[in-house]
Image (cartoon, rainbow, N blue to C red):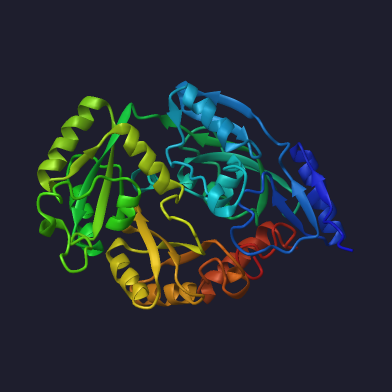
């Protein structure tokens, strides 16, 4: 008979504190969850009791005129986005929804977003989730209540713990109240679609476009086949001249990659900026509705067609991305696309050695990080989901963990061995 893991449901910071101090006394370990939407990310943590934060919900304070939102950690993302939409505002880092990748019922909670530091395509120019966390209240693994930051961007109250807490995957503290900066939602948007020879040409072209004064906001690179599957109108004059855009012998696109550049703002501004970029590239316009749908697919990694196997998130210098991809393509059958102007590559397919080969390729081309997002089988049991840290960096992480959670009560081993 299999015994189920005990679950402690909490609804206040005092109850969290009691649960943590009890765990310290019992020498037991806690798994911290709310909706459980990010449970499949990272390593399987070692725990004896599940601490359920799903009752810690609600918007505590929202001042649209001040661009400030305070919300409890267990509040669903959907609830937050609804409130922001009513005021024509947004979380500028563009929260991604990986529910289809992770086989979960929803996009999760605001606490999960902060804990994982997940950010979408707008991160390229607007910044990451950690850049919008103004402050929080939490209980550390020592059972101590503490606060950091406040409700303004400039806040001199000591260490910038907001940056430390964001992306810590619940290994340092359990957060309750979270204060975020919001921004006005753009009036409208569109995208510029440009076909180029290959991935290297794409990153170079994007760099040149971002060097102009025309304020592109996001940039993605799609292989032509994937772009066509996504419904983009490519090779418009193929019927007139098949030799112009496709190879007669293979039928494949001569221009193997497609650049998608998003422009946001007021309509008159977008029209002028797009016209200037079109003069530089000869690209086509993708109107607002189609553009928004495409960027949602890019943000949520919905461009891969079934069957989806392991999915890797690769962060590297854009100039190195083409070399990394070419190296992997030489030995693996993969599907991929890139966000953040080529600095973030999503990849699926390949064999069981894909993760190891990816990390070796990254090391050979200037460094980077490869994180396993979707495990379609047992991959995270044989290869670390997070990029292994160099010795000195791992030692620093362990010292931080010891400062906040010396008994490893919270999400033990979730990120790295001992963290």
Would you place residue 325 above or below residue 128 in this image?
Answer: below
The answer to whether residue 81 is left or right of residue 21 is left
The answer to whether residue 315 is left or right of residue 286 is right
Q: Position of residue 51 (x, y in %)?
A: 76, 49
Residue 49 visible in image: yes
Image quadrant for the C terminus? bottom right
Would you place residue 329 above or below residue 125 in this image?
Answer: below
Q: Position of residue 341 (x, y in %)?
A: 30, 54
Name the residue located 52 percent from the left edge and 70 percent from the top edge.
Answer: 393
Q: Position of residue 415 (x, y in %)?
A: 60, 63
Would you place residue 289 above or below residue 196 in this image?
Answer: above
Name the residue located 46 percent from the left edge and 32 percent from the top edge.
Answer: 182
Image quadrant for the N terminus? bottom right
Residue farthest to the right, as pictured:
1
Q: Quadrant of residue 30?
A: bottom right
Given residues 14 and 116, the one toward you in this image is: 116
Q: Position of residue 192 (x, y in %)?
A: 23, 42
Name the residue located 25 percent from the left edge and 58 percent from the top edge.
Answer: 257
Number of labels in the image equals 0
The answer to whether residue 319 is left or right of residue 350 is left
The answer to whether residue 395 is left or right of residue 412 is left
Would you place residue 103 above or below residue 265 in this image?
Answer: below
Name the residue located 54 percent from the left edge and 30 percent from the top edge.
Answer: 69
């Amino acid at each position: 008979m299999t015994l189920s893991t005990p679950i402690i449901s909490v609804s206040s910071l005092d109850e969290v504190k009691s649960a943590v101090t009890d765990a310290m006394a019992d020498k037991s370990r806690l798994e911290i969850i709310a909706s459980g939407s990010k449970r499949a990310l990272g390593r399987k943590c070692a725990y004896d009791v599940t601490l359920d934060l799903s009752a810690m919900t609600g918007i505590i304070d929202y001042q649209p005129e001040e661009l400030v939102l305070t919300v409890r950690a267990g509040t669903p993302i959907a609830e937050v986005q609804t409130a922001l939409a009513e005021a024509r505002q947004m979380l500028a880092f563009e929260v991604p929804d990986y529910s289809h990748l992770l086989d979960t019922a929803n996009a999760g909670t605001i606490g999960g977003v902060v804990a994982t530091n997940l950010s979408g395509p707008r991160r390229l120019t607007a910044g990451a989730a950690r850049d919008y966390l103004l402050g929080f209240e939490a209980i550390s693994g020592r059972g101590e209540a503490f606060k950091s930051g406040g409700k303004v961007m400039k806040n001199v109250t000591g260490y910038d713990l907001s940056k430390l807490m964001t992306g810590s995957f619940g290994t340092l503290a359990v957060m309750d109240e979270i204060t975020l900066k919001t921004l006005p939602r753009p009036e409208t948007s569109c995208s510029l679609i440009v076909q180029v020879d290959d991935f290297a040409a794409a990153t170079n072209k994007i760099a040149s476009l971002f060097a102009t004064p025309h304020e592109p906001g996001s940039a993605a690179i799609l292989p032509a086949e994937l772009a066509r599957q996504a419904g983009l109108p490519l090779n418009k004059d193929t019927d007139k001249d098949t030799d112009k855009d496709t190879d007669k012998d293979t039928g494949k696109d001569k221009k193997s990659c497609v650049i998608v550049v998003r422009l946001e703002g007021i309509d008159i501004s977008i029209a002028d900026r797009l016209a200037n970029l079109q003069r530089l590239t000869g690209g086509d316009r993708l109107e607002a509705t189609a553009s928004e749908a495409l960027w949602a697919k890019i943000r949520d990694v919905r461009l891969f067609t079934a069957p989806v196997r392991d999915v890797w998130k690769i962060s590297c210098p854009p100039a190195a991305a083409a070399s990394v991809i070419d190296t992997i393509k030489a030995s693996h059958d993969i599907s991929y696309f890139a966000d953040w102007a080529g600095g973030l590559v999503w990849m699926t397919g390949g064999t069981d050695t894909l993760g190891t080969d990816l990390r070796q390729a990254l090391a050979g081309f200037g460094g980077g990080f490869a994180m396993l997002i979707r495990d379609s089988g047992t991959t995270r049991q044989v290869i670390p989901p997070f990029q292994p840290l160099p010795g000195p960096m791992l030692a620093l992480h362990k010292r931080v963990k010891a400062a906040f959670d010396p008994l490893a009560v919270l999400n033990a081993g979730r990120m790295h061995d001992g963290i």
